[in-house]
Image (spheres, rainbow, N blue to C red):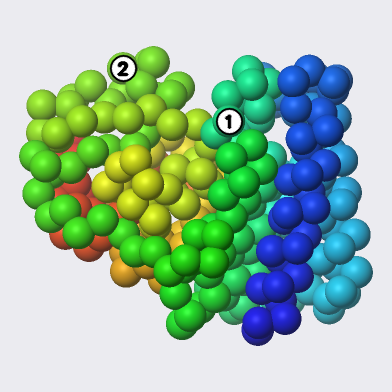
Amino acid sequence: MRAELKLAIDAARQAGALTLEYYGGNYHIDYKERRDPVTSADLAADAHLKEQLLGAYPDCSWLSEETADSTQRLTQDRLWIVDPIDGTREFIAGIPEYAVSVALVEAGEPVVGVIYNPATDQLFAALKGGGTFLNGRRVFCSEVRSLAQATLIVSRSETKRGEIEPLRPHLKDVKPVGSVAYKLAAVAASQGGDFNVSVQPKSEWDVCAGDLLVREAGGQMLDLEGQVRRYNQPDPRIEGGLVAGNPHLVHAMLELLASLR
């Protein structure tokens, strides 16, 4: 599996370098359903990742935010799950909190995960059973156990809509950060916060690589029912919320969220 990890790292770095050629305004913007933006940088990075990853492993299937989905993936055990630019709104705004996200899934479980923020040159990588690394250095989830002492990393949009306000009195601090994938990577490396909560639906390409990073850093990512995600589902959309971090914070937050419903 180390060959697949090396390939994912190389492909993510190359795709990230490609996005930097567009960073700052040299791109075209279109809009998908729910008014989600997609730029020519997203599409160029997606094409590069597909060429590199499937070129090396044509036996794998493919799921990406920027590629039309195919049910053929459901018949195969090995699947690349990719988001060429997670945090497109941050990319457009020139905020250095977007990421290239690449995961390899086997039988529903992530076994390789890479998240690369090209604007800050942070590369997070994990191999199932091999730990999580940030730019080659082993990293771990925060050891903070109490919500009252914890900093929560959350979505900017969820914060603006007031969806996180009921949680604030129970926390030390709340820090809005762009890109779901980048938030999960930050949690895995204890960078700027202790754990993450999302209350809106996400997609498998948003969270798959980050899920493995958190697991291999000693944490977990659970839905609001306390369940671990199995990937390559017929519908890649993940309804409800997710909590990621060390087990103490995750379970304390799940209890809090249940009490607030």
Q: Position of residue 146 (x, y in %)?
A: 9, 49
On screen, residue 241 above or below 252: above
Residue 132 image label = none
Dot 2: element: loop
Asked if residue 202 lies left or right of residue 37, the reply is: left
Q: Would you say residue 67 is visible in this rendering?
A: no
On screen, residue 187 above or below 155: below
Q: Residue at point 60% right, 60% down? A: 114
Which label sits in the foreground, 2 or 1? Answer: 1
Residue 11 lies in what quarter of the image? bottom right
Q: How many marks?
A: 2
Q: Which residue type carries mark 2?
A: Gly
Distance from disc 2 to disc 1, alpha carbons, whole Å, reads: 23 Å
Q: Residue at point 30% right, 42% down? A: 193
Residue 162 image label = 2
Q: Quadrant of the N terminus?
A: bottom right
Q: Position of residue 33 (x, y in %)?
A: 69, 26
Q: Quadrant of the C terminus?
A: top left
On screen, residue 131 above or below 43: below
Residue 96 image label = 1
Nearer to the camera, 213 or 64? 213
Q: Position of residue 251 (x, y in %)?
A: 18, 56
Q: Residue at point 58% right, 30% down? A: 96
Assess disc 1: are there few (<14), some (14-19) or many (≥20) residues with their C-alpha within 10 Å of its C-alpha: some
Q: Which residue type carries mark 1?
A: Pro
Query: Of callouts 2 and 1, which one flags the residue occurring earlier in the amino acid sequence?
Result: 1
Assess disc 2: are there few (<14), some (14-19) or many (≥20) residues with their C-alpha within 10 Å of its C-alpha: few
Residue 161 lies in what quarter of the image? top left
